Image: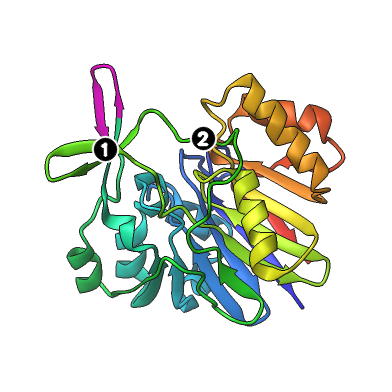
Amino acid sequence: MNIKITIICENMASLEGLIGEHGFSALIEVDDDLILFDTGQGLSFFHNVLKLRLFEKIKNTKRIFLSHGHYDHTGGILEILKLTGEKEIIAHPDIFDKKFYLKGKIKRYIGIPFSKEIIEVNGGKFILVDQPYEFSKSILTTGEIPRTVAFENGEEDLFVEKEGIFLKDKLMDDQALIIKSPYGLIIILGCAHSGVINTIKHALELTGYEDIFFIVGGMHLMSATEERIQKTIEALKSYKVKKIGLSHCTSFYAASKIYSVLKDSAFYAGCGYIFSL
């Protein structure tokens, strides 16, 4: 089994010549399967793709998985379709909810920048599912992730607008991708709005596996309390995760805290990082 994960878009550039942006995108290769995981904001995607010599692979990728409906994970979708052709897009039905960041006098739209109709006109073929979706016997999505971990509570400043009313966004569209490897599960996170520990717990229950070999992506600990960060570290330690690639919305502060305790397994995975197995 050959597995390769290349981070295309991320907050920090790990290689000379790449451009960092607040967002996330990765190319997932498992044997002959190619899946584009998220598309970043669209600011750096093709610049980084060309620098990483991935254009032909992106062109040949027939499927895109969108982890959730925020702009920094979906903003590159239209340009990708225009430049590389028709693709299936696997996502949760709530991906087109009108998502906002609201805090005090700040009101900012943070949802997907394009309508479903515009994306479809440009070659996007949506498969909208809230249950786990199998790409193959070894690759699947989590579907909706149950929120059972007490310290991974909701986010105060994220809302969804429905018929002119702003409601707390439960972000049920948040999903992750799971690869079943011979060494344990590999989990790729977008933002882990459901909570990274909720995601791990669900992935293990879903697959029947007992071990997490590698987890990479955003853990959305930017505004997490010190208590939540510490409990996250304790839980990651208890699950004995072999490799932890910290990215995107984990935040440098939380990433440094995780690294200080789990330095034998944790590292920062910026754009240009490549994992091969």
Which mark is on residue 1? none
Q: Is residue 169 above or below residue 57?
A: above
Q: Magenta stretch?
A: 102-109
Q: Quadrant of the C terminus?
A: bottom right
Please state which of residues 206 and 214 is positioned toward the viewer in this rendering: 206
Relative to residue 141, is residue 215 drawn left or right?
Answer: right
Confirm or deny contact between disc 2 and disc 1 (CB under 8 A): no
Question: Could you tell me the amino acid type at mark 1?
Answer: Leu
Percent across and percent down for residue 127 are 36, 74
Left-right relation of 262 to 77: right
- Of residues 1 and 229, the one nearer the viewer is 229
Type of amino acid at the residue the image marks with label 2: Asn
- Give residue 262's quadrant in the image: top right
Query: Which residue is found at the position 40% from the left and 70% from the top?
Result: 129
Q: Seen in the image, is 73 located left or right of residue 2?
A: left
Counting from the top left corner in percent of width and height, residue 87 is at 38, 76
Marker disc for residue 153 = 2
Tell which of 242 and 234 is nearer to you: 234
Under circle 2, the secondary element is: loop
State the SS at label 1.
strand
